Amino acid sequence: MRNKNIITKYVIYGIGGLTLLILAISLGTQTPIGAQIPPEMNGNNNNTTIFKNNAYQGHNYVKLLAQDMENRLKKAAAILELTGMLPEVKNLTSVNMLDKTIGQSKGIPQNADIPKREVAKDILEKYGEFQVVFFLMPNGDIYIEEPYSLQKNLSKTNFAFRDYYNGVITNNDTFLGNVIVSASSGQKQAVISVPIYSGENGSLTGIWAGGLNMSEFKESLQLLNLTNNERIAYVDNLGQVVADSDVNKSKTPESFATLQSFKNAIKGQSGSIVDTVNNTKMLITYQPVKAFHNTWAVLLMQPL
């Protein structure tokens, strides 16, 4: 029988009234900390006032969005951490079924360790932001993956090279990886991984992980219906776009790693500066998103 209660209790869906909250923000003329007025605007009171207004408004937008994303990531991690304490997840009842031939095993069979698979299925059913849930052995070998169709489709059998594996091993704690292309689905995803320890001696017995569905984040941004060529992007620690409010750009891989606004955000700073995006000067307001030993960023781009 599935452990529905422990999962359902902590599931919180979507972003709720985020759009209404953003629309309800009270605007002012105060310039946020970190805003740098371009030299060409100095001396022109009208342009300077417009810049200050846009920077202040942008600061409120990105601060709210960053907090929302941090909350969503924390809730997703809580699902994995809570279910990771279940005996069904901790126990490795079918570990002897792993093929010992190096590079040959794609995990245990579909009909093995059913209790663990049922917990993974419950997570996928109850929490839509996950597209895959899986368990790795301490050396990075795959043990199970759900849906099983994705386990069968794996192009690799060991994931010790992934940042979400190394992050758990290094920090002995929950870790948020950067955006990758899934080895099973071929889709863009970021993985939250949780270390699982033995109750007897406290040794690492495996890694319980979930791949976040980036389309969920993209769709929530696109619900904002921005106008005047404004654009909001969630960006990972390497500068890769995680989700984009621009429908026309959301399917194209893009990096903002060279932007000073991104570099500032990854350092933990927030503010507004003028940066050049695709040869166009933009007012970019930035805010860090801090979660599980990693830092992402929210960038709001507004044409000058």
Image (cartoon, rainbow, N blue to C red):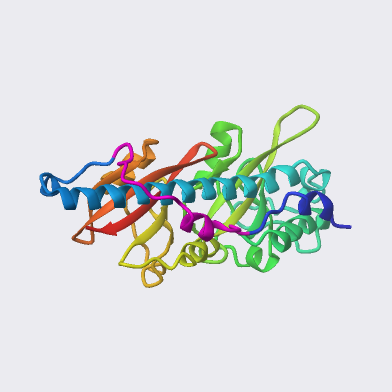
Type of secondary structure dominating the magenta stretch: loop
Quarter of the image that includes the C terminus: bottom left
What residue sits 32% from the left and 36% below the top?
A: 33
Q: Residue at x 61, y 42 (%)?
A: 139
Can you say whether 8 is above or below 216 in the image? above
Relative to 269, 109 lies left or right: right
* Quadrant of image for the N terminus: bottom right
Q: Is residue 166 above or below residue 107?
A: above
Q: State the extent of the magenta-drawn residues as a range.
A: 14-34
Name the residue rendered at 82%, 58% in the picture. Answer: 114
Residue located farthest toward the top when viewing the structure as drawn: 201
Left or right of residue 47: residue 272: right
Q: Which of 199 and 127 is in front in this view?
A: 127
Is residue 195 a member of the stretch shown in magenta? no
Q: x, y (%) of residue 42?
A: 13, 44
Seen at 30% across and 52% down, the residue is 54
